[in-house]
Amino acid sequence: MDDLLREFITETNESLDVVDVELVKFEQEPNNATILDNIFRLVHTIKGTCGFLGLPRLEGIAHAAETLMGKFRDGAPVTQEAVSLILISIDQIKDILGELEAAEGEEPEGDDSELIGNLEEMSAKADVAMAGGGAEEAEAPQEEPEAAEAEAEEDDGQTLERPLRPGEVSLDELERAFQETEIEVEIADEAVAEVEEAAEEAEEPVSAPAAAKAEAKPEPKKAAAAKKAGGDGGEKKAAGGGVSNQSIRVAVDTLEHLMTMVSELVLTRNQLLEIVRRHEDSEFKVPLQRLSNVTAELQEGVMATRMQPIGNAWQKLPRIVRDLSQELEKPIDLEMIGADTELDRQVLEMIKDPLTHMVRNSADHGLERPEERRAAGKPEKGIITLAAYHEGGHIIIEVRDDGKGIDVEKVKAKVLERGLATEAEFEKMTDSQIHKFIFAAGFSTAAEVTSVSGRGVGMDVVRNNIELIGGTVDLRSTTGKGSSFIIKIPLTLAIVSTLIVEAGGDRFAIPQLSVVELVRVQKNSEHRIERIKDTPVLRLRNKLLPLVHLSQLLGIYEGEDADQAIDADNGFIVVMQVGSQTFGVVVDGVFHTEEIVVKPMSTMLRNLNMFSGNTILGDGSVIMIIDPNGIAGAMASHASSSVAESEEDEREDVQRKAMSGQDSISLLLFRAGAPEPKAVPLSLVTRLEEFEVSKIERSNGRDLVQYRGALMPLVYVNDGDCHKSEGTQPMLVFSDAGRSMGLVVDEIVDIVEDRMNIEVGSERPGVLGSAVVKDKATEIIDLGYYLPQAFEDWFMRKEMDIEALTKKVLFVDDSAFFRNMLTPVLKAAGYDVTTCTGPQQAFELLENGDKFHAVVSDIEMPEINGFEFCESLRRDPRFRNTPILALSSLVTPASIERGRQAGFDDYVAKFDRPGLIAALKDVFSNELGAAA
Amino acid sequence: MSVLEHNLNAEADANSASDMIQYVTVVIGGQLFGLPISQVHDVFVPESVTRVPMSAPEVQGVLNLRGRIVTAINMRRRLHLPPLEDEQMMAVGIEYKQESYGLVIDTVGEVLTLTAASAETNPSNLDRRWAEISGGVHRLDGQLMVILDVDRLLGSLFTEPMAAA
């Protein structure tokens, strides 16, 4: 594209933005001649340039708009209609400009004759209106056809080589206009004067002397005005000329490049300073200090070139608010405070859209309708305030309205509807916490979707955009008084002030923006790290702060036990705030703060959301810059994963205890079908659930509930039991390999730690026997009986081997529970199982000549443990080749190795039922292979 | 920071014949590899490498090379070889998609000029992990030189995390 054209587009766009703002102002103060002059001048310039560059469409529209504005200048009353029309024209010009830019200088095809027609019509009306007040009422409308006639006549006479373009004027007409101008203006003035006159001296008839008087009167006035205008113009021109001489247009790229170079310079200076710091009494010290100062000034200077007043981002807002005001039929006033507050160009660009969106939101959702406002005793005209100010290296932008505030109930309802939170959770929340939900994705409280806002992509996008540039957005709202959004953003993105910390032996930079404070924890200081179970927290000014060690978050903790990462007696806590989330990040050391230049990470590392970039420190090493948002996200997931982990640990603990048989295990006590308590090892229960009775469905002769996207069959403890008829139905959910079964119970009584000694065996299916639990005789449920009721093939899904039917397996376990638990499993897989309570009994059986194809043995047994049992079997040549499987709760590499040494063929975890079947199948197939 | 700062590009330009390719040879775990000289920017000793937590295992870290931040890729880890102990590693600086990377290798050898035609395709039984980054094999006197395909090497690193995400 032509340089000239590019320049023109940039300039025109700027001018149009100004025109937008000025026009809105003008509409409110139609008598302000300065504003009108300003607009007129800008549009005129655009028109002129368009003509010069050969852009007929643009020129046509600009011309017609100018004509209309000319009428205003001549005193025609300013109507909203007319201003709207001019604004539409401006928009059209903008559109054409946009296309022009996209098409590399080709003016797009299109027809603007309708718009131009409207503009001309409006001009004509303005003429009418202008004349309307005065005596020459009839004259103006007549003028138009006359002019047209004249034009037509003169057109004939003119030797024009092409037809006139829309909005174009013939040369003759132009000449005529020149000649007439003087007169026309006078007439207009006269008219105005006469109107005034008429108003003042209403009683007096409009007589010749009066007219003469009037004619005489405005003369000096006009002269004075003209003089004044001329003087003003002159001054302005002079001032303008001065400014244009003192400022030059510089391409943004040039500035960006300069900024990069300065950034490099800052880095190098930091490096030099670091070197000098190590060498005391260096002669470089003084010149380096000087260099340092100069660099700092240069940095500031270059930064200043990138700084722009925030008003630039606000320029479009008055126009938007005006349009909204009309569209929504709400009178709205837009107040702008601190428009000259400066911030980095890059940041400015990034907040433009979020700001626009927020203002739209305020106008649409925030402000009430005029009648509501009146009812609430507020002035009909709503006020939206934009305020910007600096606050310690940040810029604060506030978008405030004096509307009805955020309706907590509405938000709640919406949140519930979207399933973002539950009623119970709400009860614990403050109003301000509930307000924050409007930033959640896909949230919109507008009852119906309007063209203005309410598409539900609003506030979360706003928040994302702001967080993208390291800013935060907060919200305050008072019902009936209005709401305000407070955006806090860094002044610049290029240079970030960071805190250098150490964790896990590496250094990291944390942006200061998100650091609230630093807390030093020491043994006897007032701040102590306390633990709720294993979760470390810090008591800080009556609030509990969740803590996590940075090295844990980053997965670089090298110690044995992650819980020990936080040393309760010594450490630094960086208190961080990201959005509404406040938390403490524990680090091993805090060094200093450093202004760093953020360098983007290589593409390969960009998927790491924990880091926002990297940079070179003063000592020349590279440091990773922590992304506070990533940390906040990880913080949340860390908490839940540690819960899951501890749950897992607990489960393992329970299992370990359960396996050792003699130790106490956790039992879940419940009642079902009968008043006497029943128990099942808690470790076997996947979850406890309650379902609404209405959720229980009946299909194919059995009861089912929809559970986690699948149908879960319900099983009753006794045949013929049925579920409750109303309310909620508690049940125990057992899951295995993706299948779940719900055991319907009447009531969950308790969870107890007790030994499970089955003292009285049972013949009844489904009951292993009775044991004393909590001093009461309790039936221990045999899950092995119920599981196949839900899915008949529960234990048989591993393909059954016909061969296996002939295989005899000896199962040695001292724990009755596991004998009862696993025997059905093995039987279901088709093996002929013989059980023994211990190695002694097994030896006896084997000595008696009973033949077994395989032995499955527990490891943890009293008297003789599994390893010893296996070793002694292996010493006997008869059993040298018999497959022996170890079954243990403790599956560690060491124990597996120990098992291998003892002579076990395989080592299976006790709860790994499919694993056991697979291992058996495996050893038999090996045996077959070896035999063949 | 670097003891061996060659700008090898100049040489490359001087000798670029149409079917002759110049390779910078490097040794990784005893195996000779060759990198097309046009892709090699410099050779340096990787010092004070900053670890990048949570990155791919073959990413050794990031380091400062004359004001540029270079991502160091440990070729031994990439090729699933045991780490080199007690010996100074070397690195070959390359540019890929306008970004700087350093391939950390054992030692740098010499510059060889070979004809493109004498390259053979990967033997079909080559370890899959090696075949992924190998652009063919040259038979030299007494040893074989595997052509290191930089685009495939780095390309696979780019796409892997994506697929996981």
Image (tube, coloured by chain):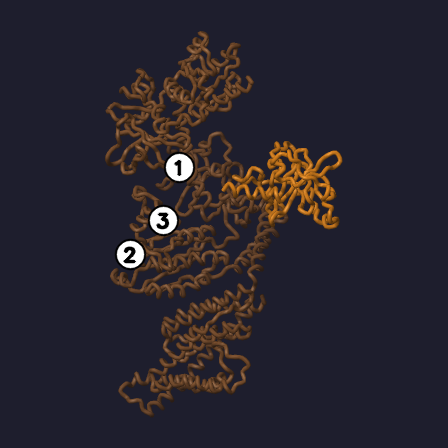
SS for callout 3:
helix
- Image colour for chain A is brown
Contact? badges 3 and 1 (CB < 8 Å): no
Q: Is A692 located above or below residue A39 in the figure?
A: above
Point out which mark residue A537 bears. Answer: 1
Can the viewer see residue A674? yes
Would you identify the image quadrant in which residue A32 lies? Answer: bottom left
Query: Mark 2 = which residue?
Result: A480
In-front residue for pair A401/A573:
A401
Question: What amino acid type is highlighted by mark number 3?
Answer: Phe
Residue found at the far bottom of this picture: A208
Question: Which residue is painted at 33% across and 17% down in the image?
Answer: A757
Question: What amino acid type is highlighted by mark number 2?
Answer: Gly
SS for callout 2:
loop
Point out which mark residue A437 bears. Answer: 3
Can the viewer see residue A588? no
Question: Looking at the image, is mark 3 or mark 2 nearer the viewer?
Answer: 3
Q: CA distance from mark 3 to mark 2?
A: 19 Å
In-front residue for pair A816/A468:
A816
Packing grade of label 3 (10 A; few <14, some 14-19, many >=20) is some
In-front residue for pair A111/A447:
A111
Q: CA distance from mark 1 to mark 2?
A: 38 Å
- Image location of residue A237, percent across then percent down: 50, 75
Instruction: Choose the circle earlier in sequence order: 3 or 1.
Output: 3
Contact? badges 3 and 2 (CB < 8 Å): no
Packing grade of label 2 (10 A; few <14, some 14-19, many >=20) is some
Would you identify the image quadrant in which residue A832 lies? Answer: top left
